[in-house]
Image: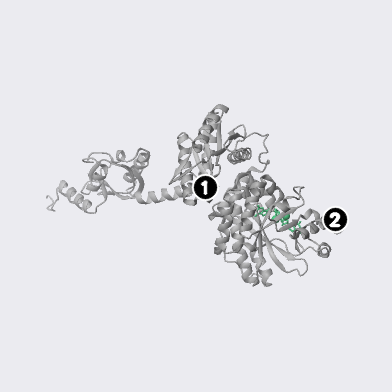
Amino acid sequence: MLSSAPTVPLRAAHSEIDSLLEEAGDVVFRLDLQGEVLFASQHAVALSGLDSLRGANLVALCAEADQPALKSALAELVQSGTASRVELRLRCEQGETWFELRLSVYGRNGAIPAAGILAVGRDLSAQHATEERLRHMATHDALTELPNRLLLSDRIRMTIAQARRSGQGFSVATVGIDGFKKVNDGLGHPVGDAVLRMAAARLRKTLRDSDTLARVGGDEFVAVLPGTATEAQIKLVTGRLLATLQAPFEIDTHTIYLGASVGVSVYPQHAEDEVRLVALADAAMSRAKETGKARCVVYSPRHSGPPEHDISLEAAMFQAVREGEFMLYYQPIVDARTREIEGFETLMRWKHPTLGMVPPVRFIPIAETNGLINLLGAWALKAACVQLKQFEEVAKRPLYISVNISPRQFRNDKFLDVLDDAMAFSGLPGEQLVLEITEGTLMIDPAHAETILTRMADRKARIAIDDFGTGYSSLAYLKRFPISVLKIDRAFIRDLPGSQKDGAICNAVLDLAKHLDLSVVAEGVETEEQLAHLQERGCQYIQGYLTGKPMAAHVAMAALRERTYANLVPPESRPDVRQVQA
Ligand code: C2E
Ligand code: MG
Ligand code: MG
């Protein structure tokens, strides 16, 4: 007997399903087991820009790169019957759009309608755009949209790998805009920013698509130039870079004349790794600036280039900045008579995950060569000012903070901005800030030093000469520059009171300071005998292991309050090195 159960014609069943699918909206496909489209929702058809998708294969409708993944997802689905999801780009009228397709089978085991596949799509384009934006932000400079230092390192590493395969060298060029600071100071930051954007666009235009141009600092750019390795090629490219920045910048009503200094290093002649290539190009650019600006210098070992140093340590430093491994210690500077804490010197520390505490003598010179010192120094200054405010709250009296400023930081066009930012952020008045520089820093460019020191004095910040007596032999600069403090180097204190020579030097410094109305801090005081000797001779302040080693902020707080660990500085109120732009 024939079954009397009512049968629904196949075509009618499908059309019922399809209209349900249509109502579900969005992008829906019904496919046969080979992936051929039996039905596509109107939305899917509209998206494709075609008249109909019937008969097309879904695999062909997605981007070529995603086809293998979809093919195997479909095969797997047909075999196992288990629903799955696949992320892919569907071809659309306007290009490609990211979708998540949920794949499932229907009507298996001979049921009606016949077995097929359902593919329901969710538009992921907004999500992908956000992810892409975040990726872009992490690797690009917000002002110019150029790659930043992180992306630059990746690009150089890629270029090294290509150069190894092809046997063709390449060069790295650091471009520093000459006189940019004048624009920022004289015409304001909005004009400065416009100049930087314009300079970035011009530099980019002189380069080929395969070249990388990154912005790595205020007015510093780095270009990676694959295939540019001979003298003639370098001359051609850098000539264009120099010329494009020499053309006047018309901004609002201003016509601004700048220029650039360029330093170049070449792979593999000068270096075979990314960090050193940039460091050497940087050294060559400094050389170009020192020798008259508006020119290009190709690195040569004859130049007083950066000292040989541990490259792996240097690479780790970039990582350390990202990971926030740098921290600050504080060493008390005390009144030699009362031993009361008057202030603190800020000393940087690097807490390396495997090497432990790396001393500043190992990493500061490296940071000085690769420019990281600008970032680290800006952070140290800001964090130290904030910290002093908190020290004062505990001590309930005014103190001062002394911060070391490296030569490169001092020469940086942005240095005064960094100083102002630290003071404004912390609310610390200039009177409570001492900036330690060495005699060498003053002597690199005395005219520039005079300007900067005067500007610092305008802000009431005091200048200390660190390691006094170990550097320059002329004392004339003490008259010329507005200096307030001399710090006698540890080398002259160590053998006191036994050494007659050191005793004589200390006496001479104390005498000189008295006549020039300068304060003196004796560094590296380790014994009571040294302290007694210095105090008898009128030394006002001392700093050394005797009265306090460099210590973490919370230990210094405890020392001030004479209660231990009671007042940890909340970490969120300290500036983070990763968030300071220099
Ligand atoms: P500095 O500015 O002359 O700092 C004094 C150094 O002497 C510190 O070494 C300190 O720990 C050490 N010291 C202090 N008292 C004694 C003592 O009684 N005996 C002995 N043996 N040593 C003592 P540290 O912290 O290793 O720093 C070394 C140098 O690194 C500093 O010399 C400074 O030039 C540089 N430095 C440290 N932090 C920074 C920073 O934030 N920025 C810059 N640019 N340089 C820094
Ligand atoms: Mg110092
Ligand atoms: Mg010193």
In terms of depth relative to the viewer, which is nearer, 320 or 411?
411
Q: Secondary structure at mark 1?
A: helix
Q: Is residue 183 left or right of residue 131?
A: right
Percent of width and height locating residue 364? 66, 49
In terms of depth relative to the viewer, which is nearer, 500 or 183?
183
The reply to whether residue 98 is in sight is: yes
Q: Badge 2 local density, few (<14 within 10 Å), some, or many (20+)?
A: few
Percent of width and height locating residue 278? 58, 40
Residue that mark 1 sits on: 183
Image quarter for ligand 2 equals bottom right
Q: Which mark is residue 504?
A: 2
Compared to residue 29, the image places residue 326 above or below, namely below
Q: Badge 1 local density, few (<14 within 10 Å), some, or many (20+)?
A: some
The reply to whether residue 162 is in sight is: no
Query: Which residue lies at the image location 61% right of the left edge and 44% below the top edge?
Result: 370
In terms of depth relative to the viewer, which is nearer, 362 or 13?
362
In the rendered structure, which amino acid carries the disc numbered 2?
Answer: Ala
Viewer-nearest of discs 1 and 2: 1
| Disc 1 C-beta below 8 A from ligand 1 | no
Percent of width and height locating residue 91? 31, 41
Q: Secondary structure at mark 2?
A: helix
- Going from the N terminus, do you reach mark 1 or mark 2 first? 1
Q: In the picture, residue 435 is in which quadrant? A: bottom right
The colour scheme used here is one colour
Q: Which mark is residue 276?
A: none
